[in-house]
Amino acid sequence: MHRYFLVLVSLLVFGCNTKSNLEKEIEELPVEVNVIRFDMEFAAAQVSDLAGLKSKYPVFFPKQYHDTIWQQKMRDTLQKELNAEVKKQFHSETKLEDELLSIFRHIKYYFPQFKTPTVLTTTSDVDYKNKIVLSNDLLIISLDTYLGSDHKFYGGIKKYISQNLKSTQLGPDIASAYARQLIVKPKQRSLLAQMVFFGKELYLKDIWLPEVSDSEKIGYTEKQLKWAQENEEFMWRYFVEREVLYSTSTKLLAQFINPAPFSKFYLEIDNESPGMIGRYLGWQIVRSYMESNDVTVKQLMIKNTNALFTESKYKPTKQ
């Protein structure tokens, strides 16, 4: 027993050291981040400053909009209140820059061709469908979509959406944006192909965001994640027995892939289940594949859905 304990401790220590060495190597990568606070500049600007702002930040001023739109926005009391709330939540760039620096270093470690973008922060009238925008060498972050799940500005937004309008989702959202640029889109239109696509995205979050919880990676509460873990075997049996994995019905995306208040099994469990359960199962398939095969992350990005599934040897266990 004593010998077994020593071996176990040695394995744990070795595992921790290996992880520590990897993270140390990543931390030494030469990456610089500078966050440009357009939101603050716009908030502090007068109408007379508009021409200068347009010249400096053309990306935020589409030519089809007349100057009166921006002038009205500068004077708008609700916009001023929004500016104040953003400044209160994100009064300094330091924390944001540190978080971005960690993400960018992790991306660069696994994808050396990665180039650090110019980072711009803005407000977007709480456009939660476009919280993060990647455009060429620009990363645009709408800070007014990260004020906190219970913020008064989110009162009219459905709970399953507002639960992720918080600062801890910044990292996962940025990771998602970059992951979708790197993962080869599946040629198949099956439910399984969508599950594996999002499973790859979530796996990238595993390696890019080592200190982020699984619940935050997928956008669940801890209670929702626990439900998914405890019911994984049942859900998988449902998918197999109903023969939906290779179905190309678009209805399945609404049922199991797209953000929703719950997944639609059309059973009593629906009220307890979180949405996007297909993404969760796809995540476990990809994790199983990476554990069972000696492949690089780049190889994972281009791996065919059906081959990946077969080689994953995925089999959920009863909780």
Image (tube, rainbow, N blue to C red):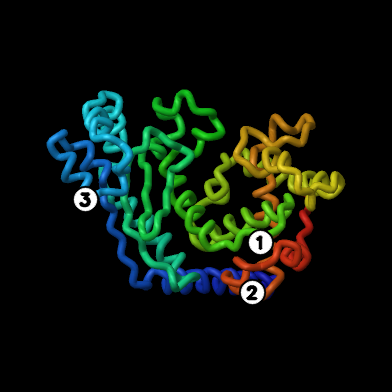
* Label 3 packing within 10 angstroms: few (<14), some (14-19), many (20+): few
What element does badge 2 sit on?
loop
Callout 1 touching callout 2 (CB < 8 Å): no
* Label 2 packing within 10 angstroms: few (<14), some (14-19), many (20+): few
Which residue in the structure is indicated by mark 3?
56
Position of 62 with respect to 234 (left or right) is left
Mark whose residue sits in front, 1 or 3:
3
* Residue that appears at 67% across and 38% down: 254
* Residue that appears at 31% across and 60% down: 33
Whole-number angstrom distance, CA of label 1 to CA of label 3: 44 Å
- The numbered mark at residue 50 is none
> Which is more toward the observer, 186 or 41?
186
Residue type, numbered disc 2: Val
Residue type, numbered disc 3: Lys
* Residue that appears at 73% across and 42% down: 252
Q: Give percent across and percent down for residue 11.
A: 61, 72
Q: Quadrant of residue 104?
A: bottom left
In the picture as drawn, the residue positioned furthest to the left comes out as 48
Residue type, numbered disc 1: Arg
Q: Quadrant of residue 7?
A: bottom right
Which residue in the structure is indicated by mark 1?
287
Which residue in the structure is indicated by mark 2?
295
What element does badge 1 sit on?
helix
Is residue 162 depicted above or below 211 in this figure?
above
Q: Give percent across and percent down for residue 274.
A: 65, 38
Q: Quadrant of residue 88?
A: top left
In the picture as drawn, the residue positioned furthest to the right comes out as 241
Q: Earlier in the sequence, mark 2 or mark 3?
A: 3
